[in-house]
Amino acid sequence: MDHLDPRSPLVISTRALTRRPGTMQELHRTVDLPDDLGTDIIAIRAGSPVRLEVRLESVVEGVLVSGTAGGTATGSCVRCLDPVVLAVEGSYQELFAYSDRAAHHHEAGVEHDDEVHELVGDLVDLEPVIRDALVPTLPFQPLCREDCPGLCPRCGARLADHPEHHHEVTDPRWSALSGLLGDHLQEKRN
């Protein structure tokens, strides 16, 4: 990444830390999310406010960024398709390496198991960190309530509105016999 827009709500300047290990800065802000975080089923939608608690600590290798992020996810219940609104919060801690330190590690062949985040100049892009913190907190199958009965698989009726709803279902293997029974009962009536 060659350039970051310092006006972006998720880009933070570390200039105040001036590469002095032990220097710390704390930020509290609410930003409007530039892109959706999540899936088609449930997500924190673009434009939604996200609360950020950010702690920036200067260390020898770069800037250690830690904190929490929280917002409101919206989506649909997987059983009845009613709207779901859910408060989510996640925590994060990532090292953003100084570009010269990251280059030194690449030259020395030092391997990292995780993705290495780099400072771009003195800027930190929190978007991937916030995404990694919040998306795993979203439910895989969101429900409007734990005991949601869902929809009738035959007609689509909302079962929460009609708890006695049911359909008479005849096993197709017995359908020929039910016809015989109907004929036999009609003969008795005559």
Image (cartoon, rainbow, N blue to C red):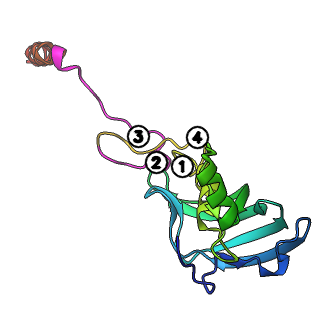
Q: Earlier in the sequence, mark 3 or mark 4?
A: 4
Q: What is the secondary structure assignment of the residue under circle 2?
A: loop
Dominant secondary structure, magenta: loop
Question: Is 105 on the left or on the right of 63, as rendered?
Answer: left
Q: What is the secondary structure assignment of the residue under circle 4?
A: loop
Q: Which mark is residue 142?
A: 1
Q: Is residue 178 above or below residue 126?
A: above
Q: Which residues are magenta?
A: 155-173
Mark 4 lies on residue: 147
Which quarter of the rendered picture does the C terminus lie within?
Answer: top left
Where, by quadrant of the figure, is residue 152 drawn? Answer: top left
Mark nearest the camera among 2 and 4 is: 2
Mark 2 lies on residue: 78
Question: Mark 1 Cα within 10 Å, few/some/many (few <14, many 20+)?
Answer: many
Q: Residue at x 60, y 46 (%)?
A: 109
Q: Earlier in the sequence, mark 1 or mark 4?
A: 1
Q: Residue furthest right?
A: 22
Mark nearest the camera among 2 and 3 is: 2
Question: Mark 2 Cα within 10 Å, few/some/many (few <14, many 20+)?
Answer: some
Q: CA distance from mark 2 to mark 1?
A: 6 Å
Mark nearest the camera among 1 and 4 is: 1
Mark nearest the camera among 3 and 4 is: 4
Mark 3 lies on residue: 165
Q: CA distance from mark 2 to mark 3?
A: 20 Å
Q: What is the secondary structure assignment of the residue under circle 3?
A: loop
